[in-house]
Image (cartoon, rainbow, N blue to C red):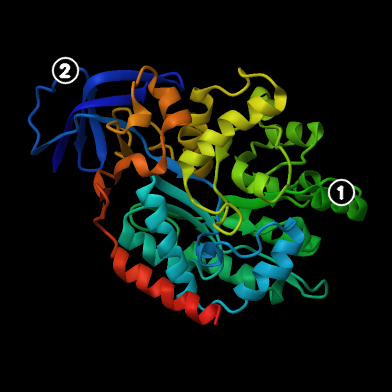
Amino acid sequence: MKLLLKNCEILADDGADGYRWIKNGFLGIDGDTIDYLGEQAPQAPYDQEKDMGGKLVCPGLINCHGHTPMTLLRGVGSDLPLQEWLFDKMMPIEDQFTAEDIRVGNALALLEMISTGTTSYSDMYFHADTAVENARQAGIKANLCRPNQCFNSAETYAENTRAKESIELYKTYNGAENGRILIDFAIHAEYTNFPHIVEAYSADCKALGGRMHIHLSETKKEHDECVAKYGKTPARWFDDLGTFASPTFAAHCVWVTEEDMALMKARGVSVVHNPTSNMKLGSGFAPIPRMLELGLNVALGTDGAASNNNLNMMEEMHLAAVLHNGYTQDPTVMKPVQVLNMATRNGARLQGRTDTGSLQVGKKADLIAIDLSHPHLYPNLDPLALMVYSAQGSDVAMTMVDGRILYENGEFLTLDADKILYEAKKCVERLYR
């Protein structure tokens, strides 16, 4: 089917990693692909026309780091340092999670993400096969992984069941739904692994042509203890074990050094900035302006709902924009175009998706529409500034992936929200009784 969105404002690609503002434009979709963009109505006929007057059409947002089943842990362990939060609060409850809990927690997260403008997300959690099935139904794009961990130094790589599960997930589901679902490899972190496991798993990732998702230098404690233990930073530790030989994206990177950043640039490692999580857990300020200056690919993520406590990418954009300006006392450090790119184009690059991340002819129709009728969005004199500084997740009036509308005007078209909320209530009652 061919669909024409008409009479809308559009933040279209300008051909140079920027945006052109089409004030009263038309966006044509043929199946799952954008086939027209312009100020004038196209000559070719469309099967259906949709009046989008009063809407700003933008690229869909890409959430590049999270742990979606942790929606069921929202509000647990607030106001604790990361290590205490993780080991004393999170893991004891997660140990009680069944595959059904994980499926429901992920489905709850999908409701939140889709309704606030996320069209693709990267997730790190166990029983990731349940997230595959949810993504199939929801219609969202997803880069999923089963993280590898090892807590026994005597355990051999052959005995590590997590690695086996991760590789089996990759072989079974990578590229499912015509590439809408991708499977990544993942190493949870340096402090939850041992070198012989990481080295062997990294070699398997490279041999199979996978992408790697890791946590890196999230806290000063993690960073300093790695240096004390191995005589090298976590970034150098991973690189020496072959992890960076595969396309890698690293979450947080709060305490990376200048040498780490140079190494990451040389190896093509992407960074996922998680401003809310970093602030809530007191982890610190990631050197994002310096990373951008060095030319690293920096994307945005929410992290899990237990350390955020929401999955709203609009909020991450706002914080990424203002936080570093305040820290550096320089209002020009983070520009709206950079921040929106972090939430769209850069995320697509990180995920290995070359056909999304911007609105241009030939790209997939992964887009959102912002309702401009709200008082806080008037006047719209600069749509880039509006998206980064003013727009809220609740302003999303439509979310579309591959030309298919997943959410519109408060209604979920591919998921049963009432059923998911009912199931989530039952999981919470059992976990916290």
Q: Residues within 10 Å of mark 1 (few under 14, many from 20)?
A: some
Determine which quarter of the picture holds residue 14. Answer: top left
Distance (Cα) linking label 1 and label 2: 58 Å
Left or right: 74 in relation to 402? right
Label 2 sits on what residue type? Answer: Gln
Q: How many marks?
A: 2
Q: Is residue 361 visible?
A: yes
Determine the secondary structure under disc 1.
helix
> Of marks 1 and 2, which one's residue comes earlier in the chain?
2
Determine the secondary structure under disc 2.
loop
Left or right: 352 in relation to 188? left
Choose between 163 and 39: the one closer to the eye.
Answer: 39
Q: Residue at x 52, y 56 (%)?
A: 123
Q: Residue at x 76, y 49 (%)?
A: 219
Q: Is residue 274 visible?
A: no
Q: Picture coordinates of residue 230 (x, y %)?
A: 89, 53
What residue does disc 2 label?
40
What residue does disc 1 label?
224
Q: Picture coordinates of residue 15 (x, y %)?
A: 40, 19
In which quadrant of the rendered image does the C terminus lie? Answer: bottom right
Choose between 289 and 363: the one closer to the eye.
Answer: 289
Q: Picture coordinates of residue 118 (x, y %)?
A: 41, 46
Label 1 sits on what residue type? Answer: Asp
Q: Picture coordinates of residue 331 (x, y %)?
A: 62, 19
Left or right: 149 in relation to 37? right
In which quadrant of the rendered image does the N terminus lie? Answer: top left
The dot on residue 376 is none
Q: Residues within 10 Å of mark 2 (few under 14, many from 20)?
A: few
